[in-house]
Amino acid sequence: MGNSEIKHHADYVNFTATTTKQESLELLLESYKALSDSQDNWVCNLANCSSLLWHTYNNPSSSSSSEGQVNWSGFYVIDPQNPKQLILGPFMGKVACQQIQIGKGVCGTAALKKETQLVKDVEKFPGHIACDGETKSEIVVPILSVGDDGEKVLRGVLDIDCLKLEGFDETDQKFLEELCRLIGSSCKWN
Amino acid sequence: MGNSEIKHHADYVNFTATTTKQESLELLLESYKALSDSQDNWVCNLANCSSLLWHTYNNPSSSSSSEGQVNWSGFYVIDPQNPKQLILGPFMGKVACQQIQIGKGVCGTAALKKETQLVKDVEKFPGHIACDGETKSEIVVPILSVGDDGEKVLRGVLDIDCLKLEGFDETDQKFLEELCRLIGSSCKWN
């Protein structure tokens, strides 16, 4: 799907060709770049990115291991009123936990360590926080950007949940880390 | 679904009983009140509210006229960088238009007039902006809150799109206006 074919914004997630997971994830990066090209509002960009993620992973023509089984895709950001916790940002899926302490659960651990958490079975993750009891596996990727002092600052995390065990692998990790680098540098954070 | 039965946040949108549209919309208001009870972050509250709206309208046990046909539910807010336009906020559905000029399209008209726009056929609405060519009907409700000077200030709009003509009626309008009053007063707007 080239940009030349896009008539409506919704068409960004109308996948027509059968694609591999790698192709779907490449398209995801391309679409995010196009949408954030002249837009730095973080709420707007994360809202559209949640939709891109949801439709990429639930794309029926994709051969992803988590195909049709992603039940939540979205973001938690540093709470502006309390930097020791994450607060719910834009997402697709069922109603979610509003706050997560840095260091707690999968999201809080990714935020504390500033490292991706690729969790093939959430039941085996110590201190897992269940927003939805049906989630079986999860990937959480930190979002960092350069702060006023030139240091890398944690802005939030990308979180995707899957109804299947082992819903995500190292290919997902590679592309989602690249996406989070794009998000970190394309948004103005307040 | 009483709060006593809620084990996970996701359970807020697990409807189990066959309900009328009125009952579904009453439950929506109750759920929003519970979720915003000790939470005033507008991004967090609008994100969970988008999910409540999506699952309320796409609840298979509801007898709503738009049952299973809502293709977008979410919010546009006043752009902090340009108060003459709305910018995309949290939503559920396909990728959406990022900015809408106040006065343009259904959302922009609701924002300009500070009045609900109940549009039974979007093709007949002068200057309709199509984020998704499949949308047939739409309801947009303004969100107002009291500003620092005691005057009512427009914060944004709630927007729901439907794949069917006449997807919304005066019952939806009544409940969604009440929801927007709750949203206006429960959130801290920056």
Image: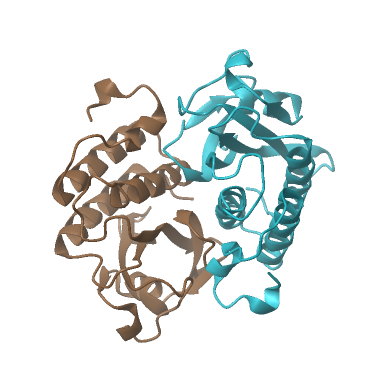
Chain colours: A cyan, B brown
Question: In this rendering, would A52 be left or right of B16?
Answer: right
Horizontal and vertical percent position of residue A5: 65, 77
Horizontal and vertical percent position of residue A149: 82, 42
Horizontal and vertical percent position of residue B133: 46, 75
Quarter of the image for the N terminus of chain A: give it.
bottom right
Residue B135 position by quadrant: bottom left
Question: At 56% from the left edge and 26% from the top edge, which residue is drawn?
Answer: A136
The correct choice, above or below, for B22 with respect to A30 in the image is: above
The correct choice, above or below, for A182 with respect to B18 in the image is: below
- Residue positioned most to the right: A150
Whether residue A81 is visible: no
Residue A44 position by quadrant: bottom right
Horizontal and vertical percent position of residue A22: 76, 50
Question: In this rendering, would A106 be left or right of A93?
Answer: right
The correct choice, above or below, for B9 with respect to A73 in the image is: above
Question: At 26% from the left edge and 52% from the top edge, which residue is drawn?
Answer: B181
Question: At 47% from the left edge and 57% from the top edge, which residue is drawn?
Answer: B93
Question: In this rendering, would B117 be left or right of B107?
Answer: left
Closest to the observer, A50 or B29? A50
Give the number of marks: 0
Whether residue B28 is visible: yes
Question: At 61% from the left edge and 37% from the top edge, which residue is drawn?
Answer: A159
Closest to the observer, B78 or A66? A66
Question: In this rendering, would A76 be left or right of B92?
Answer: right
